Image (cartoon, rainbow, N blue to C red):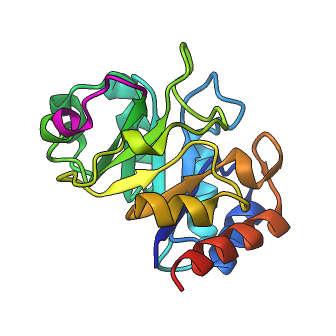
C-alpha cells in the first residue's frame, strides 16, 4: 500500500490519532513563519508518546546548521525534510536520512533534481506558489511528473480524502503527504478526515 505521512502535527492527541489510523509518518514543522510551527521541546514530547513504527520527520526551510543541530539535540527525528534552497552538501551533513522537497511547475526538470539530490531518500513534490515554501493546500499538474524518476516520489500538495485515491492511481507514488487536507484549523487535525483519507489510500490499492 502507498505510504502516508501526515504533516504539521502540533498536538499529542493528533499524533496519536494519526498513528492509530495507520499513518506511517508524522511531520513536525520547524519553520517559524508557518502556522504549524512547533518548538523542539514540544516536538520531543510528541515523539516520546508515539507508538513504535511511526516515523518522525522534521521539516526545515533554509535553516542554518546550528538550527538543525539544536533541534536534533532535543528531539529524535528519523528523517529530515528540506523545503528551501538547501544544497545537497548541506542536506547530508547531519548524519540523518533526508528528503528534498521540490515545488513543481512547468519547466522544472525533475530528473535533473533527482540526480543532483541523489543521496536523498526521496523527492517530495509539492505545488509551486511564489513566495511560499509549501503547505499551501494547492495541487499541481501531476502530468509534469516523469514516469520514471531515480528516487522514490512522495506526492504532496492539495491532497484530501476526496482526491487522494485518484492521485495515487495516476502518479503511483511511493508515499503521499497531507496536512491542510485533514485539518479543522491550521495545525489542528480532524480525526474523521484522517480516517477518510486513510480509507482513500487503501481504496486506491485495491
Q: Does the magenta stretch include residue 2?
A: no
Highlighted range, magenta:
105-113
204 w.r.t. 66: above or below: below
Residue 103 pos. (x, y %):
43, 30
Residue in view at x 64 percent, y 39 percent:
38
Image position of 146 (left or right of 101): left
Q: Can residue 163 be seen in this view?
A: yes
Image position of 85 (left or right of 77): left
Residue at the far bottom in the pictured view: 206
Residue in view at x 66 percent, y 57 percent:
163
Image position of 136 (left or right of 190): left
In front here: 31 or 173?
A: 173
Residue 185 position by quadrant: top right
Image position of 185 (left or right of 50): right
Q: Does the magenta stretch include residue 109?
A: yes
32 w.r.t. 159: above or below: above
Residue 129 pos. (x, y %):
55, 21
Residue 81 position by quadrant: top left
How many discs mark residues in the rendered view? 0
In front here: 175 or 88?
A: 175
Residue 174 position by quadrant: bottom left
Q: Quadrant location of the C terminus?
A: bottom right
Residue in view at x 24 percent, y 36 percent:
91
1 w.r.t. 91: above or below: below
Residue at the far top in the pictured view: 131
Residue 128 pos. (x, y %):
50, 26
1 w.r.t. 68: above or below: below
Q: Can residue 75 be seen in this view?
A: no
Amino acid at each position: 500500500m502507498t505510504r502516508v505521512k501526515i504533516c504539521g502535527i502540533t498536538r499529542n492527541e493528533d499524533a496519536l490519532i494519526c498513528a492509530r489510523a495507520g499513518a506511517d509518518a508524522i511531520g513536525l514543522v520547524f519553520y517559524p513563519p508557518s502556522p504549524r510551527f512547533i518548538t523542539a521541546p514540544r516536538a520531543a514530547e510528541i515523539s516520546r508518546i508515539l507508538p513504535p513504527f511511526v516515523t518522525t520527520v522534521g521539516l526545515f526551510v533554509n535553516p542554518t546548521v546550528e538550527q538543525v543541530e539544536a533541534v536534533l539535540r532535543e528531539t529524535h527525528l528519523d528523517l529530515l525534510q528540506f523545503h528551501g534552497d538547501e544544497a545537497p552538501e548541506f542536506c547530508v551533513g547531519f548524519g540523518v536520512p533526508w528528503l528534498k522537497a521540490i515545488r513543481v511547475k512547468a519547466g522544472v526538470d525533475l530528473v535533473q533534481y533527482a540526480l543532483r539530490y541523489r543521496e536523498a531518500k526521496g523527492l517530495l513534490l509539492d505545488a509551486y506558489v511564489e513566495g511560499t515554501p509549501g503547505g499551501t493546500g494547492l495541487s499541481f499538474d501531476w502530468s509534469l511528473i516523469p514516469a520514471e524518476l531515480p528516487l522514490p516520489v512522495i506526492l504532496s500538495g492539495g491532497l484530501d480524502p476526496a482526491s487522494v485515491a485518484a492521485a495515487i492511481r495516476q502518479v503511483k507514488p511511493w508515499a503521499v503527504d497531507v496536512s491542510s487536507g485533514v485539518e479543522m484549523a491550521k495545525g489542528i487535525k480532524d480525526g474523521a478526515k484522517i480516517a477518510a483519507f486513510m480509507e482513500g489510500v487503501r481504496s486506491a490499492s485495491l
